[in-house]
Image (cartoon, grey):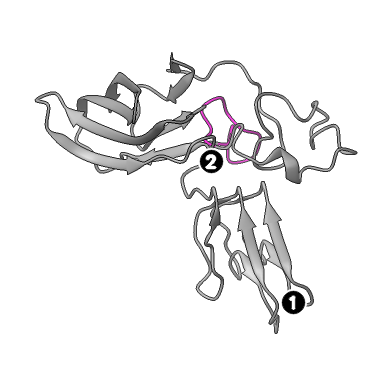
Amino acid sequence: LSISSGIDTAQVSAHFRNSIFYENGGFGMIDRGNLVDEITFSHCLISTCPSDVSCDGTNLINVDPNFISDQDFQLSGSSPCIDAGQTDYHPVSITHDLAGNHRVTGGAIDMGAYEADKASPTGNTSRFGVYIYPNPASDYLILKNVVNPLKQASLFDANGRLVQQWKLVPTETNVLKINEMIAGVYYLKLSGSSREVSEKIIVQ
């Protein structure tokens, strides 16, 4: 949005769920006015958090949502917003998205106004029920269906050197940022108390 704020909360408290706030212009993402009540977020994509708002919350991500285009805000197949919402927040009376597609499809509701085509994303890799994509990747890796006891992700280069580690959140969509990695071949190991999953990852 480039003319005004994405949200005007000047008169009420606000609780945002399953939403996408990406590259808002104008007055920014939120116009608080004289609001003194709370603003909370859960299961949202937020590209830039306003300075006067706490964006701490559950399952928040801040990467490119991978819309189909700058004019079409439906989700592409590699979007990190797919199945990343919390279905419990969705009113059962709403059965279709903004485009008229059935909602909910897949393992969970998608973030944003649209349900994506649930065909397998490009580069998708499945191992022991864990989905890792895109692969090749450049900015981030998305992990879905992470279940206990997988608790940690470790990225090793081709020489076996550890270059990055992340703490995993079971049952949530986990986004691993790799935008500072040098292009090349890496190995991603997901580990827990009694289980390991390893995959070859190509960073472009």
Residue plotted at (23% across, 40% down): 164
> Which of the 4 image quadrants contains residue 23?
bottom right
Residue plotted at (72% across, 38% down): 87
x and y percent of residue 31 in the render?
Answer: 66, 73
Camera sees residue 54: yes
- Left of 187 or right of it: where is 73? right
User: Relative to the observer, which residue lies in front, 111 or 171?
Assistant: 171
Q: For the magenta stretch, what is the residue range?
A: 67-80
The reply to whether the C-beta atoms of the residues labelled 2 and 1 are less than 8 Å apart is: no
x and y percent of residue 25 in the render?
Answer: 57, 62
201, above or below 80, in the image: above
Q: Which residue is outermost to the bottom?
A: 34
- Left of 11 or right of it: where is 198? left
| Residue under numbered circle 2 | 65
Alpha carbon distance from label 2 to label 1: 27 Å
67, above or below 15, in the image: above
Q: Which mark is residue 10?
A: 1
Going by the numbered disc 1, the residue's amino acid type is Ala
Q: SS for tag 2?
A: loop
Camera sees residue 1: no
Going by the numbered disc 2, the residue's amino acid type is Pro
59, above or below 118, in the image: below
The quarter of the picture where the C terminus appears is: top left
The quarter of the picture where the N terminus appears is: bottom right
Q: Which residue is outermost to the right?
A: 93
